[in-house]
Amino acid sequence: MRYISTRGRAPALDFEQALLTGLANDGGLYVPENLPRFSLEQIKSWVGLSYSELAFEVMRPFVKGSLTDAEFKAIIEQTYAGFSHQAVAPLRQLGANEWLLELFHGPTLAFKDFALQLLGRLLDRALLKRGERAVILGATSGDTGSAAIEGCKACAQVDIFILHPHQRVSEVQRRQMTCVLADNIHNLAIEGNFDDCQEMVKASFADQDFLCGTRLIAVNSINWARIMAQIVYYFYAALQLGAPLRSVAFSVPTGNFGDIFAGYLARNMGLPISQLIVASNRNDILHRFISRNQYHKDRLHPTLSPSMDIMVSSNFERLLFDLHGRSGEAVAQLMEDFKQSGKLSIADDRWQQACELFDSLAVDDEKTCQTIAEVYAQCGERLDPHSAIGVQAARACRRNREVPMVILATAHPAKFPEASQQAGISSAPALPPHLRDLMQREERYQVLPNALNAVQDVIAASGNRGKPL
Ligand SMILES: *Cc1c(COP(=O)(O)O)cnc(C)c1O
């Protein structure tokens, strides 16, 4: 399988190269040159497969030429064996033909584990084969950092540096990162805000001289392998609800458009998905695009659902590429204009095409808490604020009550106890057994001033280890 850039000017890569690269050198994102398409018969034959068995079938075409079937199968088995629920991604009925897909049974209790647990193993294998070491560098305001750390802590070939704003992440979120004591994990608490952390990461990717040649890898959702891993659970849920003989709809709590883009790909691969709902919080740039064809940048609004607090959605470019007949030139032009003006609208017929599949809703904090309270009263199910936004959007935007509606539950409620409290639920949601003693565990992190050279010195120093073999 070959991967091409959405801006048309970077070299095409194979799977392993795309995995190790992240952003294309023309500023675009990698997408498969030809998306695999499964027949009805083929999809039908997957009814009843376990999560890992299905993951292998769905993802196999994407890694073709880079891993053997046996290698890939073994990696997938290991990846999902670490999830705490037998079903890996259990479906729970919420209401009439309304289902919650629980994606929070991985080690860090958020859906990002589905991709990052796999990514860490794939990276380690690729680097080992090449006899290379690499540095993973990322900034986090919450979920991504812990999921990346858990995914890569066992990777012998990787040193991982995660920047978080000092004293500005919740204690649960900080401890999920800082209580991982493996020698290759480096948590850096920066005396600044999240944007400062992100800027330092961007600057380090733009000028990598401080690393003396060691490979730098991004694990944010622009990495193709993350999208790939997320396609699987759309198939998994739909097959249990009667697909491929019946259509299914999904409502997806959305920030960077990575998770829902995987659903869009599942549909293009042959899964009958009749509707995809973009569920946003107050940071609603995607909702404004889908409802009004206005992808216009706004300031950042902090909310109760911090993992969806974004100003722009990095994976949206991948959809734009398809909406423009996969013309890299057209996308490069649009993104250049957007960079200048902060605004983007597309031709009406192309926008209409997107609207045939996508609907959207923006949900504020008050409505989020109301939904948490409502669902708890209706069926005793506790929702985290991100998932609650998904439920609210599903109920408001549903087109056809005959079609099963699946809401992706992206985080465990215990990660966001303050939302439960604001919703008026008196007992705090409990952490699952493997994290019960989190508040008593030993932490390790380094506090650094808000200065690029201080951060780069630490990375370079930890570092003879970081040098290529
Ligand atoms: C990352 C995240 C999201 C947003 O996912 P995208 O792929 O960025 O759209 C939603 N909910 C939770 C809990 C997350 O951690």
Image (spheres, helix red, strand yellow):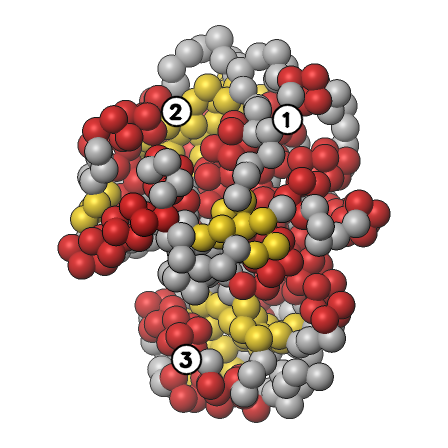
Query: Does residue 422 appear to the left or right of 74 in the view shown?
Result: left
Q: Residues within 10 Å of mark 1 (few under 14, many from 20)?
A: some
Q: Is residue 92 visible?
A: no
Q: Which amino acid is tagged 2?
A: Leu
Instruction: State the SS at label 2.
Output: helix
In primary-sequence order, the first of circles 1 and 3 is: 1
Task: Please state which of residues 146 and 271 is positioned toward the viewer in this rendering.
Answer: 271
Residue position for label 1:
38
Decide: is 139 above or below 300: below
Answer with left or right where residue 44 lies relative to residue 252: right
Regarding residue 461, the answer to whether it shows in the image is yes
Mark 1 C-beta to ligand 1 under 8 Å: no
Vertical placement of residue 180 versus 325, above or below: below
| Residue 21 image position (x, y, % from top left) | 54, 63
x%, y% of residue 370? Answer: 35, 32
Q: Quadrant of the C terminus?
A: bottom right
Using the rendered view, name the quadrant where residue 214 is placed. bottom right
- Badge 2: few (under 14), some or many (20 or more) residues near its Cα, within 10 Å? some
Kindly identify which residue carries mark 2.
357
Tell me what residue is drawn at x 56 percent, y 83 percent. 213
Query: Which residue is the extreme one toward the top?
Result: 402
Q: Of the residues tagged 3 and 2, which is closer to the observer?
A: 3
Image point (51%, 29%), residue name? 268
From the image, tell me which residue sits under label 3.
Answer: 207
* Residue for point 39% across, 62% down: 26
- Residue at the location (30% across, 40% down)? 286
Q: Nearer the viewer, residue 175 or 410?
A: 410
Q: Secondary structure at mark 1?
A: loop
Question: Residue lying furthest left in this view?
Answer: 341
